[in-house]
Amino acid sequence: MQKKKILVMSVGGSVEPCKAVKRECNPDITYFVVSQGSACKTAEIGHVSTDKIYPLTDYTNTVTCADECYKLLSSIDLKTYDVMVDITGGTKAMSAGLGYAALQLGLPTSYVDGAVRDKDGLGVVVGGSTVRTFPNIWHHREQRQMARYFKTYDWNAANDLAKSVIASVENTEGSQNVVIKKEFEAYLALIDFLRAWDLFDYVGAKKKIVEVISCWNPIQLVGDEYQKIRLLLGAVQKRVESIKNQLPTPEICVDLYLNARRRYEEGLYDDALARLYRFIELVVQYLLDSHFEIKTGEVDLSKIPDGFMVPDDRKLPLRKSWDLFCLKAPDSPFSKMFAGNEKLLFGEKNKGNGILQKRNHSMLAHGYEPISHDVVDQALEQMKRFFDLLDADKQDLFAGIVNALPW
């Protein structure tokens, strides 16, 4: 069943442009947005029994006009009607308010232009009028807003924004809106995946990346920028698949370091340092497991050198784990790196001035001290030396995806 048409137009003193719009649009219903002075003009434009007059409280107040026009447009059932909003007539405040309300709701607008105007070509159209219509491009603004959410890792806000755009265009016909809907559905799937990845939900991320890729394949999403995203998503899928859940591997170490860097960018310094502490712990767990099949959580005493003291519970803390690896593999680049940075990491005896000791004194560990920007900045620099030694792909694909989006 074909939808009926509603034309919403602002009306001022000049009726000819309004007549031109109504002739071209040929609406089933017209809503005349009027001031006290222009309400009488609707009869000249062609006011029929189905049409409605909507007087504005203050036609010189842009905010009031926008608010009242938004309420009017919001009251229209977009599942039943196709709506065109014409902003040619009325005061500038009326046109601005009506246009802004249309943009907020994703509705198309029109404006009457002309070859002949009074006032030396700067006034109203007096001849050769043409109606120009504009599809709503408000989603470009929403894309820019979403870019800000992505770059601050605000997944909840990005998710709400994508859902809002999808809900707005679902009730409005048009090929452009179909493309917008597909595009934001793809963003929604991407948000869901990135959130899971950012929270170390590797099992969930492996499932969600499949859906993301299927959303980015539709023919509507074309162009060099989207092709770049598709290629990146393929690399991302390989990266996520390479992470073995609950096993210390170079890949998961790399991912943890990059995750810590994101928390640092957000200003979450306690969270960032907690991740870096886990990073240096995970690195030595990987080294002991891959080189000597030693599990730090349940040490096989037969693999421990004579004289090396292991706690009664057979669990090696961080410092002990590094001491053991350096003892068993003194020529390893990791052992040499640790030897050169041991004081920076663990501090001098009884001084508590090491980076990792500062983590122990933080609220997220065992103390009450806040973590500063400078502490995490130094920690990132120190940990990167170990990060660089890992035999794994270190490309930051997470950042690559965020920066590749066509915003």
Image (tube, grey):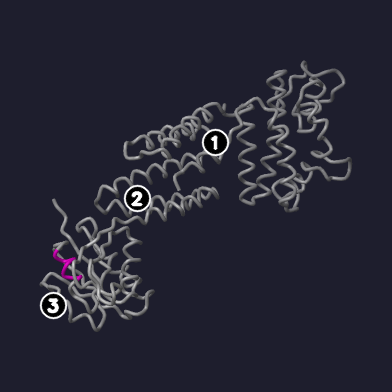
The location of residue 84, given as percent across then percent down, is: 23, 61
Residue at point 89%, 40% (across, down): 349
Identify the residue shown where x is 21% and y is 77%. Answer: 14
In the rendered structure, which amino acid carries the disc numbered 2?
A: Ile
CA separation, marks 2 and 3? 39 Å
SS class, disc 3: helix
The residue under label 2 is 166
Local SS, label 1:
helix
Name the residue tied to disc 1: 397
Q: Residue at x 42, y 54 (%)?
A: 142
Instruction: Report the residue marked by disc 3.
Output: 43
Q: Nearer the viewer, residue 230 or 45?
A: 45
**Residue 179 vs residue 146: left or right?**
left
Is residue 62 placed above or below 277 in the rendered structure?
below
Task: Residue 43 in the image: state x and y as whole percent.
Answer: 13, 77
**Viewed as shown, does residue 265 lie left or right of 238?**
right
The mark lying in front, picked from 2 and 1, is 1
**In this rendering, would 75 be left or right of 214?**
left
Farthest bottom residue in view? 37
Classified by dominant secondary structure, the portion drawn in magenta counts as helix
Q: Which residues are magenta?
A: 17-23
